[in-house]
Each structure stands twice: as C-alpha cells, then as structure tokens.
C-alpha cells in the first residue's frame, strides 16, 4: 500500500520538476511524449487510489472546475497601484521627495513593468491556497480554479519557504499564444482579440477552468508580501521567489542612482521588442525594505516605487488610400494604406481602421498626415490626425456603400460595428474564403488541396461552393496552373477521404458564423445530426448548454437559407458524415440531463473513466469537486473521508456504482 503512495508521490515530484523546467526555466529535459506517459500513469494511480487525493497534484492542471460567481475576497495586504513618471525630471523629483523622508543612501531595483492582469497568490505551508485579482485594490475576485491551470504557477513550493505569505505578479499572454488564439478565432468567423492584456484579464474570469487551461498564459512574479519573510531587500526577495519555484524574469537590476535607472530604461526601451510578452514600462523600487517601510504609502500608491512608462513608439506618415477588405463572413474591414515608414524595427505600410465609426471618430482623410503607434496591439494603429498639415482641398471620407468586390449594397445590422456584404453566394472573397475554411486542417483537412488552388478553382469557374468539390474530376483539375497528374490525383483522393471526417468537424467546416470548433462539438453532441439541428428553433438552441443568443441566431439564419439547405442535401448525397456515427449514438441518451456528478473511489463493474464517459454520454456533467451544485456523488470503494464528509454536510445524495447503473436502465 505505502509503496503505491510512494510511487504516486514520486510521480508528482517528477512531474512538478518537469513542469518547472518547462514553464519556469524554459528548459525542458524530457520530451512532451515522455511527460504525457508519466502524467497518464499518475492519473491512473490517482483514480485507483482516491485516498491519496491531493488538491495540488500536477494532474489537476487541466482544469474542469466551473465557477459561476467569483467570490469576493478582501486582500490581507492591500494591492496598490503605482505612480507614473515619463521623464528624467519626473524621476529626479521623485528622488528629491523620498530623500527628504529617509536617511542614508538609496539603492533601487529596476524591473520591467509587465502588461497583463495583476494577481495575488497566497501560499500556506508551501501550497497554493488562493489566487485573487487586484479588483479595487482592497478586494478582488477569487480566481483560484482558473489560476491553477497556469503551469508556471507552482502549486507546491520548493526549498525553504515562509509558513504563509502573499506573492504578487502579473498574468500575461505571450504574443505567440495570443496570435495562435486569434488564428483560431478568425477560423470560426469571429473578430480577433485586440490585445494580449485584455485577453489575459478576460481569461481569468472565464467560468470553465478547462478553457483557461487551453490558453497559454504565464505568471510573472515581482513582490513578496507578509510577515517574517526573512528578507531585507527587494532584490533579494526576487531571488528568494525564484528559489521557491516562481517565474521571476531575470531582467531586474540593482542600481545606485537615477542615472543608472535611466540607462536601464534606455536599454529596455529597445530590447523589450525581443521579449515574448508585452511590457509597458519599468518599475523602480527602493531596494531596502527598511527604507520602504519608512516611506510608506499615499492613499493610492507606495511612495517607495514609481513606474516609468515607455513612450509607445510613434511616427507620422501620410495616408495614401483607404481600401476595404471583405472577409469570408462578408464583414468589411477598412484598411489604411500608408506611405511606408519605419516603426519599432519593422516597415509599416498598413493599419487597420476597424470600422466606419473609427474613421468618423478620427476624422481621417486621404492625404492626411497621421500618427501611427505600435502599442499592445500587434497591428499598428492610427492614433490621430495632424490637422495642422491637412491639405486645403481635403474632403471628408465617405464610407463605401457598396461591396468593393461584387458591388452589392452593404448592410449594417443593429448593434454591429461592421458593415456586411450580403451577397453570400456571389461575392468572390466570401465564396473563396468559405471553401478555404471548409478544407482547412481543423475542418475537413483535405490533403492535396491548398488555399491558392481553391481560389484558382473558383476563378476558373470549376467550383462555386464547397459541395462542388465532391464532383471534381482529375481531368478537370489537371489543366490548372502548377498541377500535374500526380497532384491532381492526390487532390481528388484527398477530397474522397474527407467523406470519413466525423460530423462535428463537418459542422465546423460549414462555416456557420460563431460556430467554432468547441461550439460545433457541443451542437453535434446535443443534436446528433444535421436534421435535428437544422430544424431547431431559437428557443431550443439557447437552451443548449453554453449556446448563447448570438450563436443561436446565427445557426437559425444559416439554416433558413434555401441555398444552404440545398448544399447540405448535396453533401449528404455525396456521403459526408452528417450525423454522429451509429456506434457513438447507440450509447447516448439525455437521461442525466442537468445532473452534476462527482465520482469518487474505486469501481468494479466499470472503470472510473468509463463511468465518467457514461455520465457525459447520457447528458450529465462530471465535476471534480463537491459543491452545492452537485446532484450526486457516485461513491466507489475507498472514497476519501473528507469527500464523504463534505457530501454529507451539503446533503448531497451519495449513490453506489450499482445504483448509478440502474439510473441508466
Ligand atoms: P497601474 O495599473 O498603472 O497603476 O500600475 C500598477 C500595476 O503594474 C500593478 O498593479 C501591477 O499589476 C503592474 N506591474 C507590472 N509589473 C510590475 C512590477 N515589476 N512591479 C510592480 N508592479 C508591476
Ligand atoms: Zn460582396
């Protein structure tokens, strides 16, 4: 028995170390595959031995806990904001002020100011107890379940640590991950997120922690707070935090004068562009904690620290032309075509103008000199117009009224910022874009067919809709540019094989607005086939778990089009999977709808995994922890005593494996 416990502990330690190597040190020592094997092994052992449950086990990083309302928590130590400075004079003024209040020389720790969402983590006896947002500084929201999924946040500390303390930091979304998330959003016809900062703070408030787990967030720490921490300077506290296993960027530097502070600022003002995440300045902190205490706080901020904001890099250039792009959903995006100019190391030629309101707000006109800035956004943006340089004969911008591609009159729906071209089936970029989406990797994944070939096929008049793909012949394709017999054959074979792609992906491939991968899965699971889905009413749709009004309306609209219905009939005729396969279906019911289960203990007739699958296949939900929302606890042998106690205290029905199986009869 104890050898199993040892094995579990050993695996937990190993996985913790590998997580640390990978996410904190950026220096993995085993392959992802090996990591996975170990993780699965631990999952299996934990499932078989729930008596060794540990809320901080590395297996719990995948999330799954749902939070409907985030609990408000009062910070034991207030979270202050920072005063800002923008020039050498500002910094010298600050130095003069603090020198009047403390004796002796002052050293400063310079750190980068990470641009994300601030967070306060509380640790007790080396385990993460709680994670709370800054909120108004006095109290914030408890987002522990979500923060636990961020792999650079240690659940269990290393080495020597104070018995209880808070550590503050910033949750950021590095550019790479941010761009990847946006690619996926664009694939489901959604507006991309504007910047990493807002996306990071929005992520903390997601209700489903397993969604948070999918986002590549990172947590960078900068401040230890508490009593008896055994440290005397800010600089040492950073090192101490590193030793406990936290991710503390190495850029921090200890300096002796404001001139050195300015050198640090000048260096990072350029070097920050090579960092994987966004920074918006430098934070200068009095290094001695004793001096910090003497200086204390104003109503809003510490006197012992000050932020120095980087100037967002700006240049001025001429607006040559406004062009309009049509997306695959028909959304129009105005684009500013600029006189090429250097900005933050790249040549900028274009900037997004977002929509008609933005153009009106800026009062931007062709021929204007405009200020372009590269801030938190990846795409540069136009901040303002230099009205003093406006040409005499300048004319206000008239937003287009007709589609630049097909000349159809544009529409703008209530509450939508963007104009749309309603010519769904006759507007080239929409037609091509939709087919390109259909064949893309996460949709039908058609081998041998790429985006450019799709454009070619459409422009040659060979296809005008994705169902046409299934009638293409080798002979038709061969004469196309850059096609040979072999590649034509691959293309046709690739199309043929796509008939085996499961329903949920076909549904995603159809390109219904707002129906991304996850939504497609949910709809497929609920409706099981295209017939039920296409006849579902608005009310019916919004009653499906996690389907909101916006999605529901879009689905109804899609199936109200006769052309779409005909296309789907054709796809059916060609043999695509427009229903969940019979095998999958045979095992599914709605018997457990709206019921939330917690599974605990060891089972005999079915495995724990099978049990969970049975719950989900029959419409129920599995949650990892017992709460007031739990309906049933399915208890096997050796259910943990604390779980049983909790279930009993909340009056939740505890059933056996047999009783559960009877529910399904
Ligand atoms: P502000 O929101 O402009 O008042 O700036 C204060 C915020 O800067 C804090 O709440 C932190 O979230 C954030 N911040 C980012 N990096 C640091 C850092 N190295 N030290 C202190 N605060 C930081
Ligand atoms: Zn059009």
Image (tube, grey):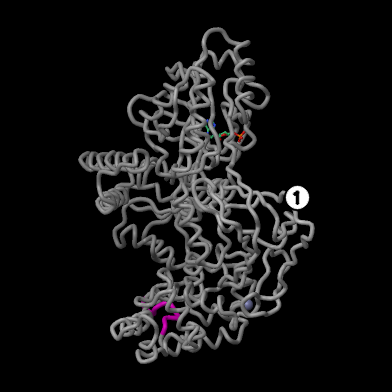
Residue at the image position 54 percent from the left and 42 percent from the top: 116
Q: Mark 1 = which residue?
A: 387
Assign a secondary structure to mark 1.
helix
Query: In which quarter of the view is residue 368 placed?
Result: bottom right
Query: In which quarter of the view is residue 276 placed?
Result: top left
Tell me which image quadrant ligand 1 sits in: top right
Q: Which residue of the protein is positioned furthest toward the top in this rendering?
A: 103
Q: Position of residue 550 (x, y in %)?
A: 63, 66
- Is residue 620 placed above or below 151 in the rendered structure? below
Q: Position of residue 601 (x, y in %)?
A: 34, 50
Magenta range: 576-583
| Residue placed most toward the observer, 573 or 239 | 239
Residue at the image position 49 percent from the left and 19 percent from the top: 287
Q: Position of residue 194 (x, y in %)?
A: 58, 53
Inspect this view and state whether residue 244 appears: yes
Inspect this view and state whether residue 557 appears: no
Q: Is residue 593 magenta?
A: no
Q: Position of residue 241 (x, y in %)?
A: 41, 28
């Amino acid at each position: 028995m104890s050898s199993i416990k040892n094995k579990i502990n050993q695996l937990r330690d190993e996985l913790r170390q590998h997580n640390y190597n990978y996410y904190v040190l950026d220096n993995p020592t085993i392959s992802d595959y090996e990591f996975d094997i170990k993780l699965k092994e631990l999952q299996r052992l934990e499932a078989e031995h729930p008596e060794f449950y540990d809320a901080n086990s590395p297996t719990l990083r995948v999330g799954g806990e749902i939070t409907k309302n985030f609990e408000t928590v009062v910070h034991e130590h207030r979270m202050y904001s920072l005063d800002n400075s923008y020039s050498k004079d500002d910094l010298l003024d600050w130095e003069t002020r603090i020198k009047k209040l403390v004796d002796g020389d002052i050293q400063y720790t310079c750190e980068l100011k990470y641009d994300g969402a601030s967070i306060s983590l509380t640790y007790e006896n080396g385990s993460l107890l709680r994670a709370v947002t800054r909120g108004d500084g006095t109290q914030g929201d408890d987002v522990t379940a979500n923060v636990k999924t961020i792999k650079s946040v240690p659940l269990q500390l290393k080495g020597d640590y104070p018995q209880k303390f808070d550590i503050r930091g910033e949750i950021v979304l590095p550019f790479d991950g941010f761009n990847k998330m946006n690619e996926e959003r664009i694939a489901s016809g959604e507006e991309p997120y504007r910047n990493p900062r807002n996306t990071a703070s929005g992520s903390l408030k997601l209700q489903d922690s397993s969604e948070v787990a999918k986002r590549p967030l990172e947590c960078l720490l900068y401040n230890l707070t508490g009593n008896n921490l055994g440290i005397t300077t800010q600089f040492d506290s950073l090192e101490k935090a590193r030793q406990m296993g936290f991710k503390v960027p190495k850029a921090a530097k200890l300096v002796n004068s404001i001139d050195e502070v300015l050198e640090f600022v000048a260096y990072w003002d350029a070097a920050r562009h090579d960092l994987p995440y966004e920074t918006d300045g430098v934070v200068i902190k009095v290094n001695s904690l004793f001096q910090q205490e003497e200086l204390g706080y104003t109503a809003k901020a510490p006197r012992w620290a000050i932020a120095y904001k980087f100037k967002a890099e700006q240049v001025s250039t001429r607006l040559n032309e406004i062009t309009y792009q049509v997306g695959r959903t028909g959304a129009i995006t105005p684009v500013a075509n600029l006189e090429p100019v250097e900005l933050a190391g790249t040549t900028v030629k274009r900037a997004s103008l977002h929509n008609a309101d933005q153009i009106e707000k800026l009062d931007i006109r062709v021929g204007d000199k405009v200020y372009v800035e590269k801030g938190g956004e990846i795409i540069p943006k136009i901040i303002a117009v230099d009205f003093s340089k406006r040409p005499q004969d300048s004319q206000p911008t008239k937003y287009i009224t007709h589609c630049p591609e097909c000349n159809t009159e544009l529409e703008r729906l209530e509450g939508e910022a963007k104009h749309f071209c309603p010519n769904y089936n006759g507007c080239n970029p929409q037609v091509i874009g939709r087919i390109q989406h259909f064949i893309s990797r996460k949709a039908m994944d058609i081998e041998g067919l790429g985006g450019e070939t799709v454009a070619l096929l459409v422009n040659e008049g060979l296809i005008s809709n994705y169902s046409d793909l299934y009638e293409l012949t080798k002979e038709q394709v061969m004469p196309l540019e850059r096609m040979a017999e072999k590649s034509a054959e691959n293309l046709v074979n690739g199309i043929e094989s796509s008939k085996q792609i499961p329903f949920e992906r076909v549904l995603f491939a159809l390109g219904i607005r707002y129906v991304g991968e996850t939504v497609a899965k949910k709809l497929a699971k609920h409706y099981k086939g295209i017939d039920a889905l296409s006849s579902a009413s608005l009310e019916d749709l919004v009653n499906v778990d996690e389907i909101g009004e916006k999605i529901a309306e879009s689905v109804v609209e899609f199936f109200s089009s006769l052309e779409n219905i005909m296309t789907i009939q054709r796809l059916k005729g060609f043999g695509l999977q427009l229903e969940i396969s019979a095998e999958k279906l045979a095992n599914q019911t709605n018997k457990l709808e709206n019921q939330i289960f917690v599974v605990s203990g060891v089972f005999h007739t079915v495995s724990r995994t099978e049990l969970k699958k049975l719950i989900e296949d029959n419409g129920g939900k599995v949650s990892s922890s017992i709460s007031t929302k739990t309906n049933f606890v399915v208890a096997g042998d050796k259910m943990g005593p604390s779980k049983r106690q909790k279930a009993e205290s909340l009056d939740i029905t505890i059933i056996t494996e047999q009783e559960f199986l009877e529910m399904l009869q």
